[in-house]
Image: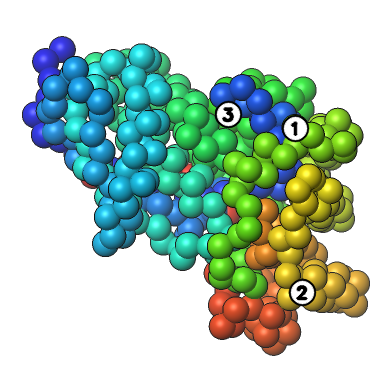
Amino acid sequence: MPIMSKTVFSWECPSNIALVKYWGKHGRQLPMNPSVSLTLKNCHTTTKIHCEPASPNQAIAVSFKLGSTENPSFGQKISQFLESIRAELPFLGNYAYNIQSDNSFPHSSGIASSASGMGALALCVCSLAEAEGYVFKSQMDFYQRASYYARLGSGSASRSIYAPWAVWGNTPTTVGSSDLYAVPVSRNVHTVYHNLNDVVLIVDAGVKKVSSRAGHALMNDNRFAKTRYEQAHDNMARVLEALETGDLELFTEVVEEEALTLHALMMTSKPSFILMKPQTLAVLEAVRDFRTATKVPICFTLDAGANVHLLFPESHKAVCMSFIEQELRAFCAQGKFIADVAGQGPQLLR
């Protein structure tokens, strides 16, 4: 097929928050345990790729801009990513790429920009493949390939391709699950979780002490790793049961256990890291006290950082937002939090 003249592809891809955490990997971005996540609506990355004909004998050239700022280091990483899949998609070498990426949420906010960013990039790659004559059997096939490529850049990005719930990692709980790509949750999800809210409390706006990549590597020598992977498989079955039956008590138990386990693993690694802040612990205690006193089904989860995600059903939004405004906002850096909700997945922008 002849090389296309200058062309543009653009996708919007959401971030996601894992409920059962992926922590530890092997091979090329393969998970040591399965994970399940909630895909968000308002927190997303928009990526536009301008493709211009280039010599196929040269290294892939990438110019990358995040917002209004040129970011050569990100451009180099994306160039390396495209080179890594060039053998599968040889046409990638026919173009130079000018990439514009914009996040709808601030950096270091406890929301994974790598997930939404690599998801959007992988979707653009698949759109380019389609334009180059690659035939996808269905939209699901298109998304599966996008999830596969997204995983190679960021493991959690594999889940951002699907909404509102996604599973990544081989698990007997989910038909068709794979370590190579994520799949949508195949069970019927109870209506209590429809439009599930996720409010992110920005406890600390600084850069975390250890990258996720380094954190995953620390699991290789963690003495609790084997037990953790067994726990994750068990919790996959439990949280999917909770999603199907609407059991909010079970949902809360599993989600909070997973969040605390993740931080316990960081604390017991060598070297060890304490990523929570005093305000983080104050929020967790306040949430549990509030839930005990009011019976309102609100729970917390955390990624590998200090910021806290609060999950609650849409039917309890008014009382939960009042609680956040009146009691929890004081623990946030400059009083900042991000209100989000379960999303509908990526969008092709024309």
Nearer to me, 29 or 256? 29
Disc 1 marks a residue whose amino acid type is Asn
Q: Crowdedness of circle 1 by 10 Å Cα count: few (<14), some, many (20+)? A: some
Closer to us: mark 3 or mark 1? 1
Q: CA distance from mark 1 to mark 2?
A: 28 Å
Q: Earlier in the sequence, mark 3 or mark 2?
A: 3
Nearer to me, 316 or 85? 85
Q: Which residue matches tag 3?
A: 29
Relative to 228, say whether 298 is above or below: below
Q: Crowdedness of circle 3 by 10 Å Cα count: few (<14), some, many (20+)? A: some
Q: Crowdedness of circle 2 by 10 Å Cα count: few (<14), some, many (20+)? A: few
Q: Quadrant of residue 136?
A: top left
Image quarter where the N terminus lies is top left
> Which of the numbered marks, if any, corresponds to residue 220?
1
With 93 as the anchor, is 295 left or right in this view? right
Circle count: 3
Which residue is rendered at x = 45% and y = 28% of the image?
Answer: 149
Disc 3 marks a residue whose amino acid type is Gln
Q: Which residue matches tag 2?
A: 278
Coordinates of residue 226 in the picture (x, y in percent): 86, 30
Q: Earlier in the sequence, mark 1 or mark 2?
A: 1
Coordinates of residue 330 in the picture (x, y in percent): 67, 85
Which residue is rendered at x = 56% and y = 83% of the image?
Answer: 334
Q: CA distance from mark 3 to mark 2?
A: 33 Å
